[in-house]
Amino acid sequence: MPVFTSDFSPTLPFKNGHFNTMYRPIFSKVICSYLRKRVTTWDDDFIDLDFSIVGSKTLAILIHGLEGSSESKYMASTSKHLNKKGLDTVCFNLRGCSGEDNLLLGTYHNGKTEDVDFVVKHLLQNYEYDNLIIIGFSLGGNLTLKYIGEQSENISPKIKGGIAVSAPIDMASAEMEMDKLKNKLYIELFFKTMKNKVLEKAHKFPEYNLDKDLLFKATKFKHLEHLYTVPVFGFESPEDYWEKASSKPFLSKICKPTLLINAKDDTFLSKECYPYEEAYSSDYFFFEAPNYGGHVGFMTSFKPEENKWLEHRIERFIRENIQINLA
């Protein structure tokens, strides 16, 4: 019955979910130096992988969230922390998120695990690692859980486990949550870059008949999905996309030690994103729901040296449950 009781206990202002969500991207100063490797994909596109190498036999694959990248503060901080503990890391920049637009009309979405599979196989075939661990944040967390679950019968023995943080595992209900007034600011922030990317794609691919008036009027993720995700990736509807991209149905199939951390005050997540029953009935899927933490926040105080709960929690799960030796 692997449901953890969380020890996350922040100071007073960080007990506000919105405060904790916004503090890390605005005030964190952490940066990480990477070595970029560009990989050509099977469909004549490219994926940029950002490595941080310390000479380990274990590689942690980090996958960012919506409109994030290897430069996202949670990615840089986790990468630096795991480096200090003796692990190599590689930040997987989803298509169109590495600072340069990808070559195809399609970029990425919540359930596009074929790209995860491609990256994993590339790393296995071209690098001599004994162990791989997949760590995903938000959208990347959903990809992590879905991939490990759907690949359960065919997953490489070198993949030892995974960790997902702030993952919207049930997309239909999570999108209803995002539509609420409490998340209006976040939607506006996401849409600033997302709408521009869709416009750029429409300019590069005239055959993609974008209704620009509808794009400018879009106020919900469902609107963008109707205009872009559904037609570009071949879904029947936004509802069809939500059903097929959600990782929740795959949790019961996970057969490697895998942890999901979703804070109870995460305003992005619905009650369906807290899979207690799935964890109770699994030998491999672990769940932890701290009372606080916001969305990919988990900051504890204004002191930078104390703001490492998430990184230490990831480290502890790797050490104790995935059973990889760390420095």
Image (tube, rainbow, N blue to C red):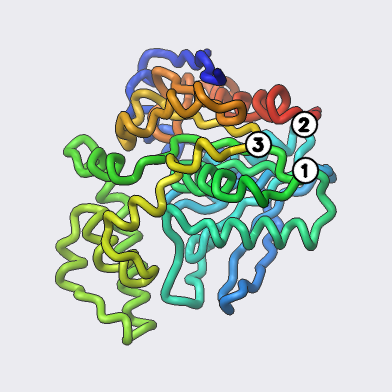
Q: Which residue is mark 3?
A: 256
Q: CA distance from mark 3 to mark 2?
A: 13 Å
- Select label 3 or label 1 by which is in front: 3
What residue is shown at x 56% (from left), y 61% (from top)?
Answer: 115
Mark 3 residue crowding within 10 angstroms, few (<14) / some (14–19) / many (20+): many
Q: Position of residue 116 (x, y in %)?
A: 58, 56
Location of the C terminus (image quadrant) = top right
Q: Position of residue 167 (x, y in %)?
A: 44, 39
Few, some or many residues within 10 Å of mark 2 (<14, 14–19, 20+): some
In the picture, which quadrant includes the N terminus?
A: top right
Residue 43, position in %: x, y?
57, 76
Of the two numbered discs 1 and 2 on the same chain, state the one appearing first in sequence. Answer: 1
Residue that mark 1 sits on: 131
Kindly identify the residue that appears in the image at 82 percent across and 45 percent down.
130
Mark 2 lies on residue: 324
Q: Mark 3 falls on what kind of element?
A: loop
Is residue 235 placed above or below 8 in the rendered structure?
below
Residue 65 visible at all: yes
Q: Nearer the viewer, residue 59 or 42?
A: 42
| Residue at (59% x, 66% y) in the render | 47
x%, y% of residue 64? 51, 48
Measure the C-alpha gap from mark 3 to mark 1.
12 Å
Which amino acid type corresponds to the residue marked 1 in the rendered image?
A: Asn
What type is the residue that disc 3 sits on? Lys
